């Protein structure tokens, strides 16, 4: 080829087919996009110039329109396959997750979390009534026959806390544990354990909501049984204080986890106008926001149980802390109605 | 249409519509590749966790040496030991729930295991893969993976309830085997699926060579010109078969195709100049079919 003009012009002139000329005119853009994709897929975003990153969406649209045109005008199977691959790879990155964790957290705390919680209020009511029912059942069963206590309360609480225990023994379990070392370890263990329960509660919701119902009841009957036990020795208020300091947060978190599980189950059983899978996906994404919040609440509850309950030995202070935090949650979820500015889905 | 596509592979082909309205063919990841990706990830998780624990243990033993004289009681109340235990619990949580989350939220949308087998997570609706989707699909990993494993260990007790629990949980673990799109419970709830990452390089343009452009062979000087009637017998399917033969450039295949075309259009098949003949026929057939396309007329195959 002896052309003194640019090589590209010569190549275009040499191509006999109009569709090949179309391709040669544009393949520079295609290869530039491919090069950017190769580097990004290898995880070298740091080494990409800013203009490359800015160019990515532009090149993506350029190549996507090349593909649309080529599909209508070209019968070159290899080129079509190449373009489809290229568009798909660029699509992954252009519509990939937004990486900024900080931005997500801002949106999450700035309204997304409370909005998602409000959206599942019917399920929250169901979960709440189940938890109350579970507690009541635990209490009533033990009141009718103390033998129930042994089958309802899990082994770790069956130390001295048994029917027939004296008031002093029971008081000792509520107060005066501050000598126990490793409060932080306790908090971390509790967080790990409780968030596991919450995640199962959520995950099982997928099975049309039945398992979370059972889990909610199962988790609250021991509560009722233990309340009955302490009530027998006139320690109800102290017991509630012992429970409430972290329990308002922890039980609220379990309530939310159960409710988000129910939310998924309900939307699959009654998808409304959507297809079942679309309904499940929509509910699942909303519920996962609630669940991210549940984990945060569990961390706070773990700290309160591990540190707060051991260090604060005054029932009135325990009650004040517990219900102060509960008030905070309620205000944050139901009165804080800011709509997050930018939606990731946009 | 494509002979290299085995039926199992064709079974995994789906079409996805991007937000721009472009239909893209995608291939779902096979269950085998997903399982191997999971195993790789679990091994990496275990190794990472073990490495961290080893590091913590080392720090602890160093401190133990420093406090040796103070004895056991001092050890128990050492805030640094507490700190190490807390870190261990937090690490356990992070590895169990954070590993998949952090990697899938990265720009590559895949964990190291998935990357190694060449698959990644994508949104089923063709839109953006959001943080919420990745969160949802990984929160459900628990009942699919860790709970059935726990229940399996519980089976040692041999009670009927344990078996019931195990089978109930296995139902979730085996979900990818009982739906067409190979969705696991997490994918179902998150609106995601796992697809193969395609790779294909740009191949040469077909009509830039001398022979293709002019229809004149450079080896024999023969000029190949086909009449409309001679080109009209084939459609797009045959054109693309011919394209594949030319790109693969295997002599026996070209001889066979050359002979078949000559027989069909009533030419006397010579020998020695098959490639030039095929290139010329390909270019002229494609020019004819493409100009038909521009007019809105398409011919899918010779049977039309």
Image (spheres, grey):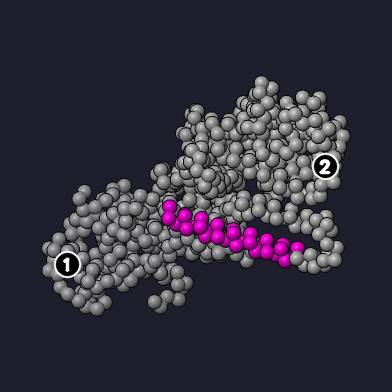
Q: Nearer the viewer, residue A116 or A64?
A: A116
Question: Alpha-carbon neighbours of circle 2 within 10 Å: few (<14), some, or many (≥20)?
Answer: some
Q: Position of residue A134 (x, y in %)?
A: 64, 27
Q: Nearer the viewer, residue B224 or A232?
A: A232
Give me the residue at 26% from left, 50% from top.
B299
Q: Nearer the viewer, residue B147 or B252?
A: B147
Quarter of the image where one finds residue B276:
bottom left
Give the extent of the magenta segment.
B31-60
Q: In the rendered view of the protein, which quadrant contains the N terminus of chain A?
A: bottom left
Q: Position of residue A185 (x, y in %)?
A: 75, 50
Q: Position of residue A28 (x, y in %)?
A: 48, 64
Give me the residue at 84% from left, 58% from top.
B74
Residue B184 shown in magenta:
no
Q: Position of residue B73 (x, y in %)?
A: 83, 57
- Helix or strand or loop: what does disc 2 sit on? loop
Give me the disc on residue B259. Answer: 1
Give me the residue at 51% from left, 55% from top.
B38
Disc 1: host chain: B
């Amino acid at each position: 080829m002896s052309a003194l003009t640019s090589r590209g012009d010569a190549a275009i002139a040499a191509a006999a087919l109009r569709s090949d000329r179309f391709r040669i005119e544009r393949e520079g853009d295609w290869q530039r996009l491919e090069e950017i994709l190769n580097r990004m897929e290898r995880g070298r975003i740091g080494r990409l110039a800013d203009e490359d990153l800015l160019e990515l969406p532009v090149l993506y649209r350029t190549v996507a329109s090349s593909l649309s045109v080529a599909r209508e005008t070209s019968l070159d199977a290899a080129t079509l396959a190449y373009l489809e691959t290229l568009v798909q790879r660029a699509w992954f990155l252009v519509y990939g997750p937004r990486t900024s964790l900080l931005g997500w957290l801002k949106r999450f705390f700035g309204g997304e979390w409370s909005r998602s919680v409000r959206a599942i209020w019917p399920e929250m009511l169901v979960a709440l009534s189940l938890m109350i029912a579970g507690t009541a059942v635990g209490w009533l069963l033990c009141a009718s026959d103390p033998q129930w206590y042994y089958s309802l309360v899990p082994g770790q609480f069956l130390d001295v806390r048994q029917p027939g225990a004296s008031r002093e023994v029971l008081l000792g379990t509520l107060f005066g544990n501050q000598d126990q070392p490793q409060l932080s370890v306790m908090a971390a263990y509790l967080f790990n354990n409780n968030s596991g329960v919450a995640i199962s509660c959520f995950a099982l919701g997928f099975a049309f909501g039945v398992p979370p119902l059972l889990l909610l009841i199962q988790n609250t009957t021991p509560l009722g049984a233990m309340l009955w036990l302490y009530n027998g020795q006139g320690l109800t208020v102290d017991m509630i204080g012992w429970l409430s300091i972290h329990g308002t947060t922890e039980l609220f978190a379990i309530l939310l986890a159960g409710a988000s599980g129910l939310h998924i189950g309900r939307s699959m059983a009654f998808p409304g106008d959507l297809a079942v899978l679309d309904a499940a996906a929509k509910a699942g994404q909303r519920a996962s926001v609630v669940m991210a919040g549940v984990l945060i609440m569990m961390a706070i509850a773990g700290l309160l149980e591990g540190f707060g309950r051991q260090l604060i030995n005054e029932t009135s202070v325990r009650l004040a802390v517990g219900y102060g935090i509960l008030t905070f949650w309620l205000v944050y979820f139901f009165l804080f109605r800011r709509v997050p500015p930018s939606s990731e889905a946009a | 249409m494509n002979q290299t596509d085995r039926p199992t592979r064709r079974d995994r082909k789906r079409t996805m519509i991007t937000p721009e309205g472009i239909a893209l063919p995608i291939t779902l990841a096979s269950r085998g590749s997903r399982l191997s990706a999971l195993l790789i990830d679990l091994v990496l998780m275990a190794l990472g966790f073990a490495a961290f624990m080893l590091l913590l243990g080392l720090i602890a033993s160093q401190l133990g040496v420093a406090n040796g004289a103070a004895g056991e009681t001092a050890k128990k109340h050492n805030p640094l030991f507490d700190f190490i235990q807390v870190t261990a619990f937090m690490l356990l949580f992070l590895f169990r729930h954070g590993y998949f989350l952090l990697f899938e939220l990265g720009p590559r949308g895949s964990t190291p295991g998935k990357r190694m087998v060449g698959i990644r997570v994508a949104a089923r609706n063709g839109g953006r893969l959001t943080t919420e989707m990745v969160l949802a699909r990984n929160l459900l990993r628990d009942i699919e993976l860790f709970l059935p494993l726990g229940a399996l260990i519980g089976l040692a007790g041999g009670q009927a309830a344990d078996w019931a629990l195990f089978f109930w949980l296995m139902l979730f673990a085996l979900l990818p085997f009982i739906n067409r799109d190979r969705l696991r419970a997490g994918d179902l709830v998150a609106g995601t699926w796992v697809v193969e990452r395609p790779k294909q390089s740009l191949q040469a343009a077909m009509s830039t060579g001398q022979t293709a452009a002019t229809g004149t062979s450079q080896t024999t000087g023969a000029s190949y010109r086909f009449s409309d009637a001679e080109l009209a017998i084939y459609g797009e399917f045959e054109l693309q078969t011919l394209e594949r033969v030319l790109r693969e450039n295997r002599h026996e295949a070209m001889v066979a195709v050359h002979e078949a075309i000559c027989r069909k259009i009533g030419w006397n098949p010579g020998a020695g100049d098959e490639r030039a003949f095929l290139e010329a026929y390909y270019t002229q057939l494609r020019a004819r079919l493409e100009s038909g396309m521009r007019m809105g007329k398409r011919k899918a195959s010779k049977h039309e």
